[in-house]
Amino acid sequence: MKFAGALKKFKLVVAGGLARLLASFGTVIVSLVIVRIQSPALWGQVVAYVILIDLGFSIVGWGATPYLVREFSLFPKNRIAAWSRATASRSLLLVALLLFIALFPAAGTLRLTLIVWAVARFIYQSFEPVVQFDRPFVFSLLVELGAICVILVPALLLRGQLTVQIVVALFALGMVLRALASAWRFRSTIRWAQPSRQFFLDAWPFLLLMFSAMLQQRADLYNVALFLNHGDVGTYQVFSSLLLFCHFLASMLLSPFAKNIFRLPERTFVKLERRFMSSGTVLSGLSIAAVYGVVHYLYRLDVPTGMYLWGYFYILIYYLYALRNYAFGKAGKQVQVSLFTLAGSVANLSLGALMTPRFGLEGALAAATLSQCLVLSLYHLRRVGTHAAN
């Protein structure tokens, strides 16, 4: 019986990890196919619309997923009411986004496709906290696999006939599949409620945390999209996504032990942090070597050598402050973490606006890496988190 329980838990962890991996980096797989069968320039044009949707939903989401997971945990009997109130409230933000898309300077069919994509993403995103709380990870994994297949199979069949409109339509179709499957699977959760001003006030700190994190990760890409050509945009999106994937893998090393990390006394925490930093110097080297292999041999992209040097430090810096998140989290300093991240975002945007037009892709990545240095400094200058870990 113990073995069966352990095996079930192992399957749950694996399915959850794979589902999270596909949800976060499925776009990387799609980008590989588009770049190889068409061109980085086509992918760069598509990235502009991916940015539009992602940026819009960083606001439409309003931090609902982490907020609702907390509410579900604290007040399980009020789950459906909390979910309904949050979804109804966020629907007002969706309407504003749809109006913006309707006025967006693009072809009518493309605007309609973006509207379908946005509505489907709203539905799918609404069920994310339910998935995180109930943990039907096998279902989530199958949905993500199905959505990727919906995009990739037609893309491979069409090959040289692909256009921006077709690729955006395939992204929208994949999101429609996710939305329909989730709505059917969690239909018992769906209830009508009135929008609530209190939801916006309660979930505001979670919005600040998620928006600042997203902006810090993507500000350099926004500058590239603004100042450089479509080919450079496609290349940079691929490269930066692989670097973020390396951050994701680093966080995965810690996440299984999160409960134990929060309980560590001061001295043990400091020892663990130093070991993680030391291992980061080696793991960052292995990571950037893997990035080189993927970019050079799979994508077959020409990336300046300096990008790999900056990329190494971009990955390494994350190892140098990753455990700070746990210390500050235990101390209840989430808002302070948001402010650190927001400061990094502003630095990334500002430095990138100066460096990207002059130094191209290397300038954008240098700005992102230097902004990471600022975040690192803020974490380690402010020692509250470590002392709180007693």
Image (cartoon, rainbow, N blue to C red):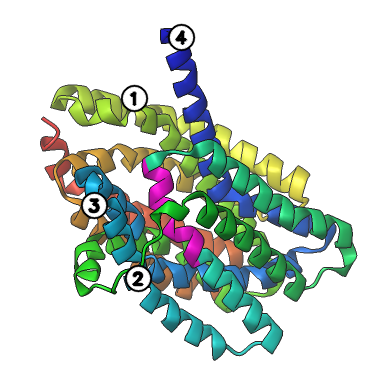
Residue drawn at (65%, 45%) of the image: 145
Can you identify the residue that label 2 sits on?
88
Residue drawn at (67%, 60%) of the image: 235
Q: Residue 124: say if magenta.
A: yes
Between the residue at mark 3 and the residue at mark 2, the CA separation in whole angstroms equals 16 Å
Q: Earlier in the sequence, mark 1 or mark 3?
A: 3
Segment colored magenta: 122-133
Mark 4: few, some, or many residues within 10 Å (few <14, many ≥20)?
few
**Quarter assignment of residue 171:** bottom right
Between the residue at mark 4 and the residue at mark 3, the CA separation in whole angstroms equals 35 Å
Between the residue at mark 1 and the residue at mark 3, the CA separation in whole angstroms equals 43 Å
Between the residue at mark 4 and the residue at mark 2, the CA separation in whole angstroms equals 44 Å
Left or right: 89 in relation to 3: left
Q: Which amino acid is tagged 1?
A: Arg
Q: Which mark is residue 160?
A: none
Q: Earlier in the sequence, mark 4 or mark 2?
A: 4
Q: Nearer the viewer, mark 4 or mark 3?
A: 3
Mark 3: few, some, or many residues within 10 Å (few <14, many ≥20)?
few
Can you identify the residue that label 4 sits on?
3
Q: Which mark is residue 275?
A: 1
Q: Which amino acid is tagged 3?
A: Asn
Between the residue at mark 2 and the residue at mark 1, the CA separation in whole angstroms equals 46 Å
Q: Secondary structure at mark 4?
A: helix
Mark 2: few, some, or many residues within 10 Å (few <14, many ≥20)?
some
Q: Earlier in the sequence, mark 4 or mark 1?
A: 4
From what the image shows, is residue 124 above or below residue 117?
above
Residue drawn at (36%, 64%) of the image: 211
**Quarter assignment of residue 253:** top left
Residue drawn at (32%, 72%) of the image: 89
Name the quarter where the C terminus is drawn: top left
Q: Secondary structure at mark 2?
A: helix
Can you identify the residue that label 3 sits on?
78
